Image (cartoon, rainbow, N blue to C red):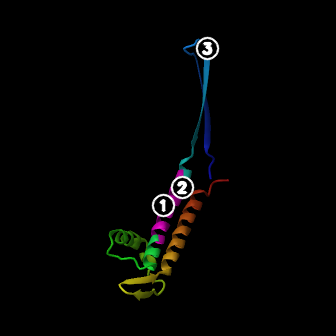
């Protein structure tokens, strides 16, 4: 990635304290800044991390047979359902039922996480094509 610019600023304040002694105070400040490309790449990986986390939580909730009537579970299923929809029919879904809860293993979620990771990697590599 591009180099991060680093500036070090030193400030010197001189004065006399209440007892008449000369006092010198030095302050060092380090400022760093990256270019827009680095920020964009970091943003892409952050978004991918959120997507992978949502899909991972969905997988765990489905695997443990979470109650879809719960508001949190319903929110996760709704948001992550949009992300997993293109991959839902890749495999047959196996499920077991115990009482009122149904445990479902969806390997298509693992495929979705991998595909979104490859997309994020491809975009970040495309952005860094001209770097040496």
Provide the secondary structure element on which disc 2 rests: helix
Mark carried by residue 47? 1
Give the image location of residue 76, x and y in percent.
Answer: 39, 69
Do the numbered discs 3 and 2 sit on residues whose CB atoms are within 8 Å?
Answer: no
Residue at point 59% right, 11% down?
Answer: 20
Label 3 sits on residue? 21
The residue that appears at 49% across and 79% down in the rendered structure is 108
Front position in the image: 54 or 87:
54
| Sequence order check, earlier mark of 3 and 2 | 3
Q: Is residue 2 above or below residue 116?
A: above
Query: In the visual, does 129 lie left or right of 56?
Result: right
Which is in the foreground here, disc 3 or disc 2? 3
Say which element carries label 1: helix
Is 12 part of what is drawn in magenta? no
Q: Is residue 27 above or below residue 106?
A: above
**Range of residues picked out in magenta:** 39-56
- Of mark 2 and mark 1, the one earlier in the sequence is 2
Q: Dots 3 and 1: beta carbons under 8 Å?
A: no
Q: Distance between the residues labelled 2 and 1?
A: 9 Å
């Amino acid at each position: 990635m591009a180099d991060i610019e680093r500036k070090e600023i030193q400030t010197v304040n001189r004065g006399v304290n209440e007892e008449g002694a000369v006092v010198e105070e030095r302050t060092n400040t380090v400022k760093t800044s990256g270019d827009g490309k680095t920020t964009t790449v970091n943003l892409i990986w952050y978004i991918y991390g959120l997507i992978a986390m949502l899909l991972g939580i969905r997988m765990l909730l489905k695997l443990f047979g979470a109650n879809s009537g719960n508001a949190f579970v319903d929110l996760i299923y709704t948001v992550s359902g949009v992300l997993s929809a293109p991959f839902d029919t890749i495999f047959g879904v196996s499920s077991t039922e115990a009482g009122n809860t149904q445990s479902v293993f969806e390997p298509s979620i693992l495929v979705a996480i991998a595909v979104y990771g490859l997309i994020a990697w491809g975009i970040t590599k495309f952005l860094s094509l001209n770097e040496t």
